[in-house]
Amino acid sequence: MALAWPLRACHEVGRGDLIDALVSVAKRLSANVRPNSSRAETLMLLINAVLPHGLKPVMPAIASLKSLTGDSHWRIVRAFVDCALLVNEHGRQTAAEVASLIPVENKRAATLARLEDGQTMQPREFFW
């Protein structure tokens, strides 16, 4: 999670050339976060930090999040919902793929409907 701040800073100061390498490190480190609900939170902070730089740099974090589909902990469900809404503005197909993996049926259906309506979320602010 600590790498989210420097990743957003790279974007803010125009050093996007550093983002892919840092995302790779963050993804590798996130694999060690336990329990999976905490790992989902870590990945969502990473996605929030990097998404302003575009969809492509967050795809490794999204792939890691997708690996948590077998767990229906509320924090994991929230991470899938938030991720789908965050990326919907950048890639509707990616958003639908993420939403289709939500492990709780009513949350999955509601999120898919929200995506169909064009709803999105904006990445969180890191610096004020």
Image (spheres, rainbow, N blue to C red):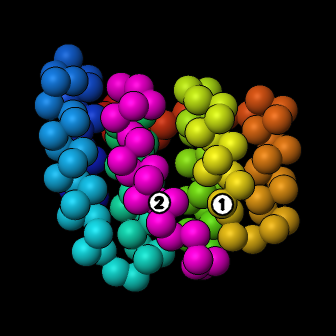
The residue drawn where x is 66% and y is 60% is 101
Left or right, residue 14 beside residue 127: left
Q: In the image, what residue occupies the spot 84% across and 56% down?
A: 109
Q: Position of residue 70 (x, y in %)?
A: 58, 77
Q: Does the magenta segment cover residue 64?
A: yes
Percent x, y for residue 41?
Answer: 44, 63
User: Mark 1, residues whose alpha carbon is within 10 Å: few (<14), some, or many (≥20)?
Assistant: many
Q: Is residue 16 visible?
A: yes
Image quadrant where residue 56 sits:
top left
> Which dot marks residue 45?
none
- Which quadrant is home to the C terminus? top left
Which quarter shows the N terminus? bottom left
In the rendered image, residue 51 lying in the magenta stretch gets the answer no
Q: Residue at x 45, y 50 (%)?
A: 62
Element at label 1? loop
How far from the left and from the top, in percent, is residue 110? 83, 53
Q: Does any portion of residue 6 appear in the rendered image?
A: no
Taking 89 as reference, is 30 above or below it? below
Q: Residue at x 51, y 60 (%)?
A: 66
Relative horizontal placement of residue 99, taking residue 75 as reference (left or right): right
Image: magenta residue range = 52-73
Label whose residue precedes the other's in the sequence (1 or 2): 2
Residue annotated with mark 1:
101
Q: Answer whether labels 1 and 2 touch (C-beta < 8 Å).
A: no
Residue occupied by mark 2: 65
Inspect the image, locate mark 2, and give the three-letter code of the amino acid beneath it.
Answer: Leu
